[in-house]
Image (spheres, rainbow, N blue to C red):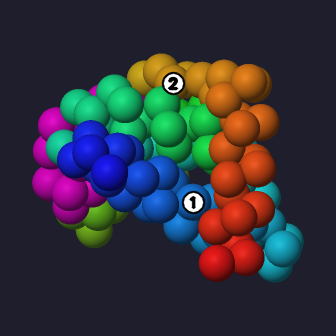
């Protein structure tokens, strides 16, 4: 096995784990329609596309390189009374580039078969 094959398998395994979590949410009645991604991994286009394909959901990218700091600022703004609640603060202060990565139907189908194997293992 080549190093790049192992690397890709690790990326796919994390995506399969994410899909498992999404399915648990949905089984419990919490719909998941979109994933909004933050942090350094957004720079890895291969990883982002694998996540879109495995989860069959579009990926949006947070519009800030400092997501945790922005979240803290939103909560501070609510605490200071600048916004009524976190939803209002997020609406005013947050931004996301929507649908940056879209699932590819052919690859998603191939990943469905691999995901079935992942669940068995």
The x and y percentages for residue 113 are 76, 50
Q: Relative to the observer, which residue lies in front, 1 or 121?
A: 1
Distance, label 2 to label 1, CA atoms, is 17 Å
Q: Is 59 located above or below residue 105 in the figure?
A: below
Q: Relative to the observer, which residue lies in front, 79 or 49?
A: 49
The x and y percentages for residue 40 are 19, 44
Q: Is residue 88 visible?
A: no
Asked which quadrant contains residue 45, the reply is top left
Asked which quadrant contains residue 20, the reply is bottom right
| Element type where label 1 sits in the image | helix
**Callout 2 environment at 10 Å: few (<14), some (14 to 19), or many (20+)?**
some
Q: Which residue is mark 2?
A: 101
Q: Earlier in the sequence, mark 2 or mark 1?
A: 1
Q: Is residue 48 left or right of residue 2?
A: right
The segment highlighted magenta reads 61-73
Q: Is 93 located above or below residue 27 in the figure?
A: above
For the C terminus, the quadrant is bottom right
Give the residue at x 69% y 58%: 115
Q: Relative to the observer, which residue lies in front, 38 or 92?
A: 38
Give the residue at x 76% y 62%: 116
**Callout 1 environment at 10 Å: few (<14), some (14 to 19), or many (20+)?**
many
Q: Is residue 58 left or right of residue 29?
A: left
Q: Quick check: is 71 in the magenta stretch?
A: yes
Disc number for residue 16: 1
Asked which quadrant contains residue 48, the reply is top left
| Element type where label 2 sits in the image | strand
The x and y percentages for residue 33 are 71, 45
Disc number for residue 69: none
Give the residue at x 68% y 53%: 114
Q: Is residue 67 left or right of residue 20?
A: left
């Amino acid at each position: 096995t080549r190093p790049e094959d192992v690397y890709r398998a690790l990326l796919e395994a994390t995506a399969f784990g994410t899909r498992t979590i999404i399915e648990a949410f949905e089984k419990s009645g919490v719909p998941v329609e979109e994933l909004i991604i933050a942090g350094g991994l957004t720079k890895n286009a291969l990883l982002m596309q694998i996540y879109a394909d495995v989860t069959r959901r579009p990926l949006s990218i947070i519009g800030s390189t400092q997501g945790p700091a922005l979240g803290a600022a939103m909560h501070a703004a609510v605490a200071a009374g600048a916004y009524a609640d976190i939803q209002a603060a997020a609406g005013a202060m947050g931004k996301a580039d929507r649908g940056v990565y879209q699932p590819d139907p052919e690859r998603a189908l191939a990943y469905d078969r691999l995901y079935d194997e992942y669940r068995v293992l």
